[in-house]
Image (tube, grey):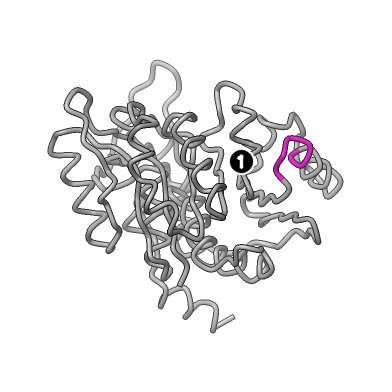
Amino acid sequence: MNKITVLGSLNVDTTFRITRFPNPGETVQVHEKANAAGGKGANQAVAAARSGAKTSFIGQVGNDGAGKFMLHSLENDNINDSYVTTSETTGTGTANIMLDQNGQNCILVYGGANQTLTVSDVKKAEPIIKSSDFIVAQFETPQDAAIAAFKIAKDNGVTTVLNPAPAPSKSIDAELLRLTDLITPNELESASITGIKIDDNDSMIATANKFSSLGVDNVIITIGDKGAFYSTKSNNALMPAFKVKAVDTTAAGDTFIGALVSQLKTDFSNIETAVTFAQHASSLTVQRLGAQPSIPTLDEILKVENNK
């Protein structure tokens, strides 16, 4: 069983189901409204836990009902929340999700307490980081917090995974990239970092080489319904996606990452098997509504794998 620590965001998601996205200045009717636990970090932790990993979380909520709701949701999935701090001045993060009839979404995120997580908060979590196999971070919490966590990890032989999502509005700190063992962007995030648009195999190879020049030798790029491209020092390949009818793509990428690290060996020797497992997991997620409510369990993923 892999031991995973996730450093990341905790958001309460409000999803609005609509026929289509509004044009500027236009009002559209909402057909259904639902609230659920979310945030990229929390989603990835839940996916790892439900995929069989022993999972811990580093993050921050506000001293409010939403914060209590998020802590309760972590505990429901047996995620260690001992290192989730509470801000007395900033509210819990939220996300408003517009979901159209084709399963595509647009998301507005209020960072809230996620953005006030400090290096000091992270350093208090050193014991749990040191005991992990992997630590995962994203960009819904400050980069300096991720750097602090990755430094602790690297000093203790823990494998670091950076999911550069959402796409950074400013450049990624070069030190963070040098501390990263595996980077897991989607194709748009990858292009925003490397300047290389992914449209064929050559561009995938060029992207992997660019990441290597930035200090990251291992890359997995998710490319929507085309699948996932991986590159390590020893091999690279595009692994096709499984074809399913998407109802809601929310949390599909987060499910992929959480499921991936639940199975991946720290030397990446089983990367193809782990990617396939993660693709099965995310294929289940997109067939359901919501973020965390849509994330499958280990039994559900194995059932799909065994039926292929």
Please state which amino acid type lies under the numbered disc 1: Leu
- Give the quarter of the image for residue 178: top right
Q: Is residue 255 visible?
A: yes
Q: From the image, which quarter does the N terminus lie in?
A: bottom left
Residue at the bottom extreme of this rendering? 306
Q: Can you say whether 28 is above or below 11 in the image?
A: above
Magenta span of residues: 211-216
Front-most of residues 54 and 210: 54
- The residue nearer to you, when weighing 244 against 81, is 81
Q: Residue furthest top?
A: 25
Residue 207 is drawn in which quadrant? Answer: top right
View extreme (front): residue:
155
Please give left or right for residue 153 compared with residue 207 in the image: left
Q: How many marks?
A: 1
In the picture of the structure, the residue carrying the numbered disc 1 is 179
| Residue pictured at 77% horizontal, 33% vertical | 196
Q: Residue at x 79, y 56 (%)?
A: 233
Percent coordinates x, y for residue 271 in the rendering: 66, 65
Residue 14 % position (x, y): 28, 39
Quadrant where the C terminus lies? Answer: bottom right
Q: Is residue 109 magenta?
A: no
Q: Is residue 272 left or right of residue 140?
A: right
Give the crowd class for mark 1: few <14, some 14-19, many >=20 residues within 10 Å.
Answer: many
Q: Secondary structure at mark 1?
A: loop
- In depth, the one of 180 and 258 nearer the eye is 180
Question: What percent of the width, then of the height, locates residue 3?
Answer: 44, 63
- Position of 186 relative to 273 (above/below): above
Residue at (69, 34) in percent of width and height: 191
Answer yes or no: is residue 16 visible: no
Give 73 or 151, whichever is nearer the viewer: 151
Residue 39, position as x, y percentages in the image: 36, 42
